[in-house]
Image: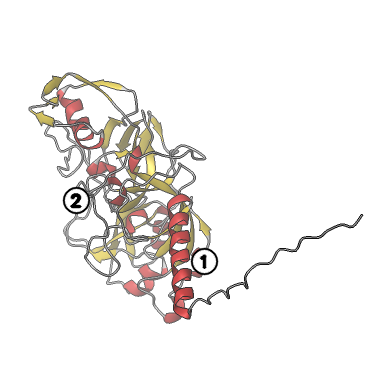
């Protein structure tokens, strides 16, 4: 029995048209942008430190990676945006987004909650002219978590009545009393002090008397001990505000509150599900939270009273968690002491390590890169 074999024929195959060099280049660019956008959104984002508010833990010119996975990645709220931009298109003042569409925002599961002591990147809450995900990025240390009672007593932070361990590289402002003019480049720069000035006047009553001359510096307690060893240094003492001095620029802005940066609180950090009675003092503490960050419509605050959608309320239950943030440069940081709490939906991620550090004012070309800071874990 013969086996018949059928052979099918097909038309001659058409040669595949080779991509032009320009098309291959364009495809590569598109792929790179899409991949970078996904990585930046979902896993890790690079940031740089532009201000000294976190010194000496983080320095101006540090480049760091921030993990989105630790606290969970946020879904995009503003989809109409040029990829890999933030508020403006690179090198211009042209807005990089349109706020015509605002999506509900959710957070994917993360490795952990925000912990007290974490160094956190977040969107600056008072910047109400931008959508939440496009507000300016700030970096500070978390001092208070939801429900914590935060207080600063004579420079020391207390949480729930217990003194919080200070960051190892924390800075304060000091007056360095000297017998003669100082070679600033040699003495201060060589000791890692980037912020210093000759004394003119200061806030508080601890420095100096009229017959003293010297310098105001921002530095750590350990470097202060080094400065005291110089023979031209008479004394070094911290600049601090007495408890009875009121600093009007602090949060909350209310005549009921008489605090300053060194003696602040106590104040309770709002917690999701917690209910407060709206006394005049609580209205001062939490009125802005209710008005700007809770998604309420038509909130009015007047004479210590709050109304929502035209109805007066005597109590309020918070809809999300909040955090209290402070810079490690305690006397040169615009933080929660000045503008209030950070809502959970403003949290971007956890700062994990420095991958590059460039000194903005190097003493030599060879010293421009701070080699000892490369791949340093952020503590």
Look at the image and tell me whether residue 237 can be seen.
Answer: no
Would you identify the image quadrant in which residue 310 lies? top left
| Label at residue 372 | 1
Residue sitting at the far left: 303
- The first of marks 2 and 1 along the sequence is 2
Q: Nearer the viewer, residue 60 or 167?
A: 60
Residue sitting at the far front: 1
- Residue located 49% across and 74% down the image: 24
Look at the image and tell me whether residue 315 can be seen.
Answer: yes
Q: What whole-number distance in Å separates the C-alpha atoms at marks 2 and 1?
A: 35 Å
Judged left or right of residue 252, residue 23 is right
Q: Position of residue 266 (x, y in %)?
A: 28, 31
**Quadrant that contains the N terminus:** bottom right
Q: Position of residue 211 (x, y in %)?
A: 18, 61
The answer to whether 365 is drawn above or below residue 166 in the figure is: below
Query: Mark 2 sits on what residue?
Result: 203
User: Is disc 1 placed on a helix, strand or loop?
Assistant: helix
- Residue located 46% across and 50% down the image: 42
Would you identify the image quadrant in which residue 106 lies? top left
């Amino acid at each position: 029995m013969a086996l018949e074999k059928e052979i099918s024929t097909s038309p001659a195959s058409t040669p595949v048209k080779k991509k032009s060099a320009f098309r291959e280049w364009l495809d590569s660019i598109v792929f790179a942008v899409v991949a970078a956008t996904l990585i930046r959104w979902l896993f890790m984002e690079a940031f740089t430190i532009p201000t000294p508010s976190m010194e000496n833990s983080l320095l101006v010119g540090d480049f760091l990676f921030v993990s989105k996975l630790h606290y969970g990645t946020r879904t995009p709220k503003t989809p109409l945006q040029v990829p890999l931009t933030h508020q403006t298109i690179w090198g211009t003042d042209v807005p990089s987004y349109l706020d015509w569409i605002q999506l509900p925002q959710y957070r994917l599961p993360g490795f952990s909650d925000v912990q007290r002591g974490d160094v956190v990147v977040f969107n600056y809450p008072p910047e109400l002219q931008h959508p939440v995900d496009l507000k300016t990025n700030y970096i500070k240390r978390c001092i208070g978590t939801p429900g914590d009672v935060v207080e600063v007593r004579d420079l020391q932070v207390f949480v729930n009545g217990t003194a919080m361990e200070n960051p190892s590289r924390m800075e304060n402002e000091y007056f360095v009393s000297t017998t003669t003019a100082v070679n600033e480049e040699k003495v201060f720069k060589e000791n890692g002090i980037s912020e210093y000035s000759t004394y003119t006047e200061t806030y508080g009553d601890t420095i100096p008397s009229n017959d003293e001359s010297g310098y105001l510096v921002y530095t750590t307690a350990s470097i202060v001990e080094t400065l005291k060893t110089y023979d031209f240094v008479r004394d070094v003492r911290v600049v601090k505000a007495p408890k009875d001095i009121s600093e009007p620029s602090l949060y909350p802005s209310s005549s009921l509150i008489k605090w300053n940066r060194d003696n602040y609180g106590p104040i309770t950090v709002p917690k999701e599900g917690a209910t407060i009675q709206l006394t005049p003092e609580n209205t001062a503490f939490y009125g802005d939270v209710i008005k700007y960050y809770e998604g309420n419509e038509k909130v009015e605050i007047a004479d210590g009273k709050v109304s929502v959608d035209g109805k007066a309320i005597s109590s309020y239950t918070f809809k999300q968690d909040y955090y209290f943030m402070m810079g490690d440069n305690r006397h040169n940081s615009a933080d929660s002491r000045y503008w209030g709490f950070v809502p959970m939906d403003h949290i971007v991620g956890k700062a994990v390590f420095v991958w590059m550090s460039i000194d903005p004012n190097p003493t030599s070309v060879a010293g421009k890169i701070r080699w000892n800071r490369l791949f340093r874990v952020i503590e």
